[in-house]
Image (cartoon, grey):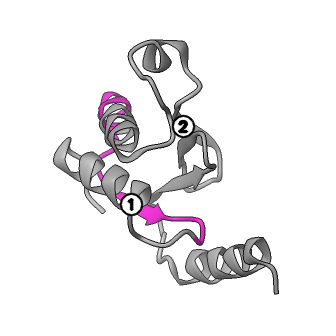
């Protein structure tokens, strides 16, 4: 089994186990160069998003695929979510291991007001 197939299989399992109910879902996707974060409503619509491709984020960064950038993205997504009155979310790591950029992003979002 290829690594992408394994990650997608893991992501499917994680999404099935999430007890969403009326919670919003914070989803993380990463490539070697960029990090993307979205918050989905219980109905499946994108409410808030942030990524390293945004001009206002990119202008201050030298490299966009590292832990420091993930911390910045976590802070930005938390601020945008709180503006929309979203405090509690279910964390969906999309099959990625919880370490490195994914962990840094999650901790930064928690520090800035989101509850997982």
Q: Nearer the viewer, residue 27 or 20?
A: 27
Q: Is residue 23 left or right of residue 86?
A: right
Report which quarter residue 69 is drawn in.
Answer: top left
Disc 1 crowd, CA 10 A, few/some/many (<14, 14-19, 20+): few
Q: Residue at x 59, y 74 (%)?
A: 15
Give the percent coordinates (x, y) of residue 116: 30, 63
Task: Find numbered disc 1 in the image and state the secondary structure of the residue it sits on.
Answer: loop
Q: Is residue 104 above or below residue 79?
A: below
Q: In the rendered structure, which segment of residues is drawn in magenta?
A: 78-95
Give the percent coordinates (x, y) of residue 40: 56, 49
**Pointer 2 with pointer 1, Cβ within 8 A:** no
Report which quarter residue 60 is drawn in.
Answer: top left
Please tell me whether residue 32 belongs to the stretch shown in magenta.
no
* Residue marked by disc 1: 100
Q: Residue at x 37, y 30 (%)?
A: 80
Report which quarter residue 34 is drawn in.
Answer: top right
Q: Nearer the viewer, residue 59 or 19?
A: 59
Q: Which mark is residue 66?
A: none
**Alpha carbon of mark 2 to alpha carbon of mark 1: how far?**
26 Å
Q: Indicate which disc, 2 or 1, sits on the residue closer to the N terminus.
A: 2
Screen quadrant of the N terminus: bottom right
Task: Find numbered disc 2 in the image and state the secondary structure of the residue it sits on.
Answer: strand
* Residue marked by disc 2: 47
Please tell me whether residue 92 belongs to the stretch shown in magenta.
yes
Give the percent coordinates (x, y) of residue 16: 61, 81
């Amino acid at each position: 089994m290829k690594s992408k197939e394994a990650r997608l299989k893991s992501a499917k399992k994680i999404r099935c186990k999430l007890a969403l109910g009326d919670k919003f879902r914070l989803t993380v996707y990463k490539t070697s160069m960029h990090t993307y974060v979205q918050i989905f409503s219980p109905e499946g619509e994108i409410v808030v998003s942030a990524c390293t491709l945004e001009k206002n984020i990119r202008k201050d960064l030298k490299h966009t695929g590292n832990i420091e950038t993930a911390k910045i993205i976590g802070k930005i997504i938390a601020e945008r979510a709180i503006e929309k009155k979203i405090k509690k979310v279910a964390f969906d790591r999309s099959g990625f291991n919880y370490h490195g950029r994914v962990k840094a992003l999650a901790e930064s979002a928690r520090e800035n007001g989101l509850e997982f």
